[in-house]
Image (cartoon, rainbow, N blue to C red):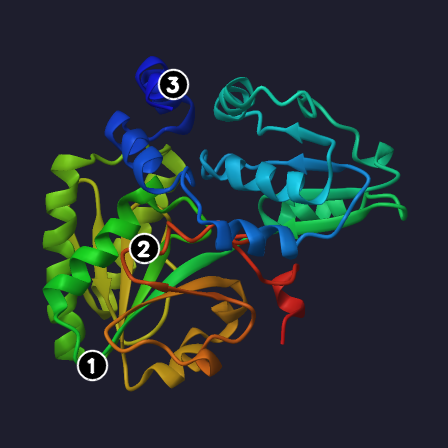
Amino acid sequence: MSRLRDQYRSELSFVTKLSPAGVDFALDHALETDPSQAELDALIDGATEASRVVVVLSSNVFTASLRAIALAKAAAAKVIVKPSRREPMFVRLLAEYASDPDVEIVKEIDIRSIEHGELHAYGSDATLQTIAAQVPNGAVLRAHGTGFGVACIDATAPLDEAAEALSRDVVLFDQSGCLSPRIAFVVGDSERAEAFGRSVYEALNGWATRVPRGAVDEQTLMEVRGYADSMRMVGAVLEAKDHVVAIWDRVRLPPAARVVHIVPLRGPELLDAALGKLAPFVTTVGAYGAPLEMRWLSRGRRAAVLGMMQSPPLDGPVDPRVWPPSTVT
């Protein structure tokens, strides 16, 4: 893998829009190269046997193709993979590296031709709805759609340490993945939330020199500017060239470009109530301080230690929610 990294770092940076340092950071911390036997057993035990699996990938997290292919191989000997048009490179490198003749990479796939086996599809809810409408009755669709992560900072957690942990998860993939934390709840009052916001801002300043943010399209930059402007009217905003931190006592989902929305919370048991209509879209909760009780992690979410939200064990899908998320109770 080090050979691939050195040879293709610049190309991966170009297609993923991450900085070269961001590519290295992702390969070091989000690529499952050393799973335990227990994790592999859990992945295999969770798979259902299929005649073949077709995998349709998104471009948000380039390393996610390894887990997607592993899940497919756990279910079927024959796997067909269609990479995203925006990021086909890493999948092809993986296939070259693995040299598995039963993993076929294709440029196009006709969803209506999948008459048996399983279709594992990754992407936005809108994309998955289009795909779902085309899947024949003989095939099983396993879809993984729109989602994001949240952090919960316990009342006794050291704020500087928690801020550094949160920032690590924010910087990885520049918040583009479904596990990326975009909202952080701080158990305590508004003053504690503001203090945490300052710590997060300073932590992100440090990360910006080590792992600069990658390229951001103009539409996203406009969304970031609009978000920051609106937050100034109701809360506190700390803004730098590559990141924004806002503190407000109400929840709002910020754009995904190293932007963190911080909310004070009376207790972690109020997490879902605070999230409101956003709750079904939360894929994972990263906790710092006291561990979250499982009853607070309804809706099939993953629980993670803050700082490791984007490095889950290779024990199954990173997003265990039922799709579409609005159907989860």
Q: Identify the residue position indicated by label 2 in the image.
A: 308
- Residue 225 is at least partly visible in this image: no
| Dot 1: element | loop
Q: Identity of the amino acid at label 3?
A: Leu
- The CA span between labels 2 and 3 is 24 Å
Instruction: Answer with mark 3 or mark 1, whichever residue precedes in sequence.
Output: 3
Does 193 appear above or below 179? below
- How far across and how far down the image is residue 160, in percent? 10, 63
Does 15 appear above or below 282? above
Q: Identify the residue position indicated by label 3 in the image.
A: 4
| Dot 2: element | loop
Q: Identity of the amino acid at label 1?
A: Ala
Does 49 appear above or below 8? below
- How far across and how far down the image is residue 167, in percent? 22, 53
Residue at position x 18%, y 79% in the image: 190
Residue at position x 29%, y 50% in the image: 170
Residue at position x 45%, y 39% in the image: 61
- How far across and how far down the image is residue 306, in percent? 29, 61
Quadrant of the image containing the N terminus: top left
Q: Identify the residue position indicated by label 1 in the image.
A: 155
